[in-house]
Image (tube, helix red, strand yellow):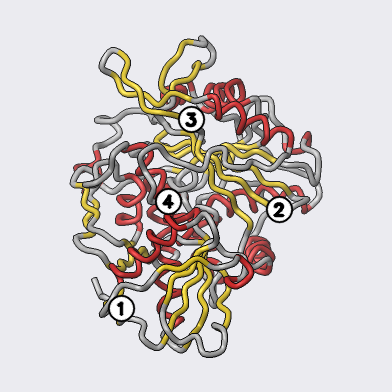
């Protein structure tokens, strides 16, 4: 039973309500597939529990639902050899909220919003109201964390999902691992992350956990923000894999791994989870919006915090009202490598568009369906809609790190229509470079 949660409840409501709960859990898996990148899929021994005072039967069908997803750093369930490195339950007793995410699902529009709450966010902690780091609220259990988030954001929390180290690794291994492509070395000794060069890596459960937990990678300026960006990348990569042909969600072993680690009513079966997965895949590319609570880095008495800015209130107000979010919560201070926020469309001009698509997907970009390049467009180029030149430069740098080019792909402005409404268009021409292998 998750720390601070009430006992598991058996629901007798219609199938759609039970399915909504499982779909939310799968969203934490699919949409993060991230516990860490979604309450971390990231640690996906997903435990779904009702927070005190909340009842699934009290929710209104077809209304937006807010699901609090927590990544717990509990060492429970880790094998002895890993506890020697990460610490045992005796060494690190209890659990803390290593990752805090709010998933807002709107059944009417089909849109989901993923809001990362930095763990070092300085907010009033329930029930005392004393200012402190958000992750410390979990010391009072899930109820205290729920109350803290509700009081701070003004958003009602309908459901709660918790994921831990051991479960996350089991789910990722059941998925057959997740391929991640990086355009620079990423090494963090403390997190046991070792991606020594730019390239593509198939990460099993242990490697994936290291990727989403890393906080000390060379080049990171604000660790909390840098890790959130990697979690977003991991989540997009899992989503891209989930929606690809021969999806991972058709694997019986994955459905069993989810069922074995999911606290739901006995009416939910592996068959039903597979059915929900097929329904989700039939939607194509899901409409998921990644946001981070707007905040800036501060030091108080030598302690590092992230202080919410005035824009945080604007983000929550728009979420509550169901209004467009605009630019609220999109940027991370002094950290611009948010590939998950960039939509890319490949224009097939005769090159190896399939490999390019695969690597962009594993890089965490939102990769839209490929289209043919205009007649005669056989030269490789990176195109950008007005105002997205910086994103085009980031995409060009990514491509140059993962493919060998005689000359770097040129960057040109283009109309949104010419690149199918994407932020960035890539003409994969006959002169496209060869893939670099890690």
Percent across and percent down for residue 423 are 54, 61
Q: Are marks 4 and 1 in contact (CB under 8 Å)?
A: no
Who comes first in sequence, dot 3 or dot 2? 3
Q: CA distance from mark 4 to mark 3?
A: 32 Å
Q: Are marks 1 and 2 in contact (CB under 8 Å)?
A: no
Residue 126 lies, with reference to residue 420, above or below; the image says: above
Q: Who's the residue at 57% across and 84% down the image?
A: 374
Q: Who's the residue at 31% across and 38% down the image?
A: 223
Question: In terms of image quadrants, where is residue 397?
Answer: bottom left
Who comes first in sequence, dot 4 or dot 3? 3
Residue for badge 4:
338
Of labels 1 and 2, the one closer to you: 1
- Tally the numbered discs: 4
Disc ID at residue 435: 1
Residue for badge 3:
3
Q: What secondary structure is found at the residue carrying circle 2?
A: helix
Q: Who's the residue at 63% across and 34% down the image?
A: 50
Q: Residue 218 vs residue 104: left or right? A: left
Percent across and percent down for residue 66 are 65, 38
Percent across and percent down for residue 218 are 21, 47
Disc 2 packing (10 Å; few <14; some 14–19; many ≥20): some
């Amino acid at each position: 039973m998750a720390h601070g949660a009430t006992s598991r409840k058996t629901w007798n409501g219609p199938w759609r309500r039970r399915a909504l709960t499982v779909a939310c859990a799968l969203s934490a898996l699919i949409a993060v597939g991230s516990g860490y990148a979604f309450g971390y899929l990231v640690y996906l021994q997903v435990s779904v529990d009702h927070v005190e005072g909340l009842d699934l039967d009290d929710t209104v069908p077809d209304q937006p639902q807010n699901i609090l997803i927590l990544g717990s750093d509990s060492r429970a369930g880790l094998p002895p050899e890993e506890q020697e490195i990460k610490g045992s339950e005796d060494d690190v007793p209890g659990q803390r909220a290593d990752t805090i995410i709010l998933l807002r699902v709107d059944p009417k529009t089909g849109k989901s919003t993923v809001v990362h709450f930095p763990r070092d966010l300085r907010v009033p902690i329930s029930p005392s109201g004393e200012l402190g780091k958000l992750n410390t609220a979990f010391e009072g259990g899930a109820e205290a964390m729920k109350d803290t988030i509700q009081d701070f954001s003004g958003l009602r929390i309908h459901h709660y999902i918790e994921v831990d180290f051991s479960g996350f690794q089991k789910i990722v291994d059941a998925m057959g691992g997740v391929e991640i492509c990086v355009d620079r070395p990423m090494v963090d000794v403390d997190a046991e992350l070792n991606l020594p060069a730019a390239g593509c890596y198939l990460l099993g459960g242990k490697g994936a956990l290291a990727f989403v937990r890393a906080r000390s990678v060379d080049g990171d300026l604000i660790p909390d923000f840098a890790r959130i960006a990697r979690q977003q990348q991991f989540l997009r990569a899992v989503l891209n894999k989930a929606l690809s042909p021969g999806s991972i969600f058709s694997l019986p072993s994955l459905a069993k791994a989810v069922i074995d680690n999911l606290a739901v009513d006995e009416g939910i079966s592996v068959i039903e989870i597979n059915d929900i997965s097929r329904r989700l895949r039939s939607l194509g590319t899901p409409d998921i919006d990644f946001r981070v609570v707007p905040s800036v880095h501060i030091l108080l008495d030598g302690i590092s915090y992230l202080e919410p800015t005035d824009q945080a209130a604007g983000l929550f107000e728009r979420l509550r009202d169901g209004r467009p979010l605009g630019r609220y919560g999109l940027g991370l201070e002094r950290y611009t490598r948010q590939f998950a926020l960039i939509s890319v469309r490949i224009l097939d001009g005769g090159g190896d568009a399939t490999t390019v698509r695969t690597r962009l997907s594993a890089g965490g970009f939102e990769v839209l369906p490929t289209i043919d390049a205009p007649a005669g467009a056989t030269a490789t180029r990176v195109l950008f809609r007005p105002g997205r030149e910086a994103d085009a430069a980031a995409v060009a740098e990514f491509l140059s790190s993962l493919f060998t080019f005689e000359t770097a792909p040129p960057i040109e402005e283009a109309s949104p229509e010419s690149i199918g409404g994407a932020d960035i268009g890539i003409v994969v021409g006959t002169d496209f470079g060869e893939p670099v292998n890690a």
